[in-house]
Image (cartoon, rainbow, N blue to C red):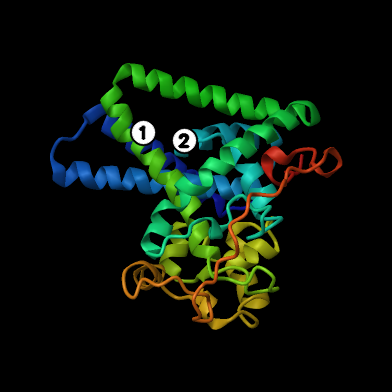
Amino acid sequence: MLRYRADIKTLLFVATYFALVAAQWIYAPRALWLAIPLLGATCAFSFLGAVATHNSVHCPVFRRRWMNRAFQVVLTLTYGHPVSAYVPGHNLSHHKYTQSRRDVMRTTKVRYRWNLLNGLLFMSRVVRDILPADMRYFRAMYRRNPPWFRQMLLESAVFLGAMAALLALDWQKFVLYVLIPHQYAAWGIVTMNYLQHDGCDEDSEHDHSRNFVGRLVNWWTYNNGFHSIHHIEPGLHWSLLPAAHARRVAPFIHPNLDQPSLLAYLFRSFVWPGKRLRYDGAPVVLPPEEPDEEWIPGPKETPADVSLGAIAPS
């Protein structure tokens, strides 16, 4: 059923998210010592649902295509966004045109002198370009790839229906246990792009991405810290990334792009000294601010089953 046994963890994490939401919805804990940790855990597992979404559009979880399509609907409910809608801006813009004007998520769009603001507000800056571009892509796929468009509509319909039902049942619980975790997940998965690419060399064969190689953070995030090898081979399953990184990236990459601690990097980049630096220690020099270039692929460039990001074997 599963293409890789490691995705048992994916299924367990997704189930944990739904269990957390259900438990809080039913019992509505009022004691802060319990309510705050539970909400924090729900936000964390919603974010992990976003990471699983990222993984699934690159390398499907199941062997059967119908199961992957169904799982995309489930994942849509974990982080509050149709999984198919993740593909345009991420797979077709960011991966193909990293940090160029065709990358709708390029980090040079944020230009605050205080680097903490760049990290906090990166999502709010890029989302205003992502949404219109996604709409153009959806319109294009309506004619070019009807199966993809129908899958996106299915995910959207189930998501909107579920959210409307929960909102009608109890709007306060909906905001606290569903909406806030979803917003955190969306912010977190987009902000990771800033951490993994700002100050890197997009023209380099190996120095185009920043890696966070700590064992604990990678255990929880499906090895998402190994980002260079992911860009080199996007369809490689997440469980294979550490070994591939050690073999194909680590011997060649600048040592500053293999960060041993995510928390230490966050402190240095956003607290003290809090400077926006390139991987080699020089200040980031921003290019002139220019509008996005068109990145939506033509009909002959569009994969037949791009909704999955990779085609699962039948």
Q: CA distance from mark 1 to mark 2?
A: 8 Å
Q: Secondary structure at mark 2?
A: loop
User: Which quadrant of the figure has residue 203?
Assistant: bottom right
The spot of residue 278 in percent (x, y) is 52, 75
Q: Considering depth in this image, is 309 or 272 the residue closer to the camera?
A: 272
- Is residue 249 shown above or below 233? below
Measuring from the top left, give residue 213's x and y in whole percent.
49, 71
Q: Residues within 10 Å of mark 1 (few under 14, many from 20)?
A: many
In the figure, residue 151 lies in which quadrant?
top right
Q: Are marks 1 and 2 in contact (CB under 8 Å)?
A: yes
Q: Residue at x 56, y 34 (%)?
A: 82
In the picture, measured across the screen, residue 275 lies left or right of residue 308, that is: left
Q: Secondary structure at mark 1?
A: helix
Pointer 2 residue: 80
Name the residue type under label 2: Gly
Q: Amino acid at mark 1?
A: Val
Left or right, 86 with reference to 47? right
Q: Nearer the viewer, residue 268 or 211?
A: 268
Where's the N terminus, which quadrant? top right
Classify 10 Å Cα crowding around label 2: few (below 14), some (14-19), many (20 and above).
Answer: many
Q: Is residue 84 visible?
A: no
Q: Is residue 21 visible?
A: yes
Q: Which is nearer the eye, 246 or 92?
A: 92
Residue 83, x across and y down, in percent: 58, 38
Residue 31: image tag? none
Q: Is residue 205 above or below residue 58?
A: below
Circle nearer the N terminus (1, 2) = 2
Q: Is residue 258 left or right of residue 60?
A: left
**Residue occupied by mark 1:** 178
